[in-house]
Image (cartoon, rainbow, N blue to C red):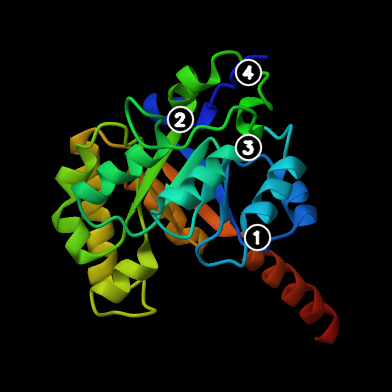
Amino acid sequence: MQLPRNEFKHGLAAGETQIGLWSSLCSTISAEIIAHSGFDWIVLDMEHAPNEVPDIMAQLQAMNGSSSSIIVRPPWNDMVTIKRVLDIGARSILLPYVQNADEARKAIEYTRYPGGGVRGVAGGSRASGYGRIKDYLLKASDELCVLLQVETVEALDQLDEIAAVDGVDGIFIGPSDLSASMGYLGDTNHPKVQAQIKKTAERLAKLGMPSGILGTQEEVAQLYVEWGYKFVAVGTDAGALRSATDSLLKRFKD
């Protein structure tokens, strides 16, 4: 049994633009449905959704065989949670609220085995095919993708240093927290927030670092693609369900 290739990681390295979807419904059924919609990547959220490690594993199992790359967002840049998420088979992780280069280095260390990090060693985890993947412990980091969220004014001041940390595969900008940090809570479309988002895409491009973002409005998400963001979530599963059901009822009630 061979270590699976991380298509998302290699796509980022090749400069490809990849379109994604955010998942927070915490359901194996909805996960299985969206897994075959054709998105390049899908985030399973633990930070702002009531997902725990067993929930995420069940959703990963439901999404097995999908062409979409699955990214897991742990609730925090925490060594223990990251270890558990990696052991259940997550190959791409998105870590929230990274504020500086030191936190970025710790994030990388949490995902690497001793010799390059502090990840605890499990011999027969789901990630290793329950021990069937040859030399998993030696090769795991080759196909592991680590994305860091930069989502405050303070973190943006440290952007160059964060992006320079070895092992970081991409930087994700969090529009909601960034707008709050800038004094525009709940207004991600404020002109000053959008100007900062555009400027950040340009900065990351100059640094050669793939950039990502979430746009829940189609026209805004399209702007992000045009500005050079390389992995863009263009909606959420909860939002898509809400819009579809609201629209269905409206057509009949009206």
> What amino acid does circle 4 point to?
Ile
* Residue position for label 4: 133
User: Are the residues tagged 2 and 1 within 8 Å (C-beta)?
Assistant: no
Badge 1 local density, few (<14 within 10 Å), some, or many (20+)? some
Residue 64 located left or right of residue 117: right
**Relative to 50, does residue 115 appear above or below in the rendering?**
above
The residue nearer to you, when weighing 253 against 1, is 1
Task: Check contact, mark 4 vs mark 3: CB within 8 A.
Answer: no
Task: Identify the disc placed on residue 237.
Answer: 1
- Observer-side mark, 4 or 3, equals 4
At x 35%, y 69%, the residue is: 177
122 displayed left or right of 186: right
Helix, strand or loop at label 1? It is helix
Residue at which label 3 appears? 68
**Can residue 16 be seen in the rendering of this structure?**
yes
| Upstream in sequence: badge 4 or badge 3 | 3
Query: Do tag 2 and tag 3 residues touch (Cβ < 8 Å)?
Result: no
Residue 201: percent from the left, percent from the top?
27, 48
- Asked whether residue 40 is in view, the answer is no
Percent x, y of residue 41 = 56, 41
Among numbered discs 4 and 2, the one appearing first in the sequence:
2
Disc 3 is placed on an element classified as loop
Q: Quadrant of the N terminus?
A: top right
Write down the quadrant of residue 187 in the picture: bottom left
Q: Amino acid at mark 3?
A: Ser
Tell me which amino acid carries mark 2: Lys
Extreme residue in the right direction: 252
Task: Name the spot of residue 19 as percent of width and height, x first.
Answer: 52, 43
On the image, which quarter does residue 236 sit in? bottom right
Dot label at residue 9:
2
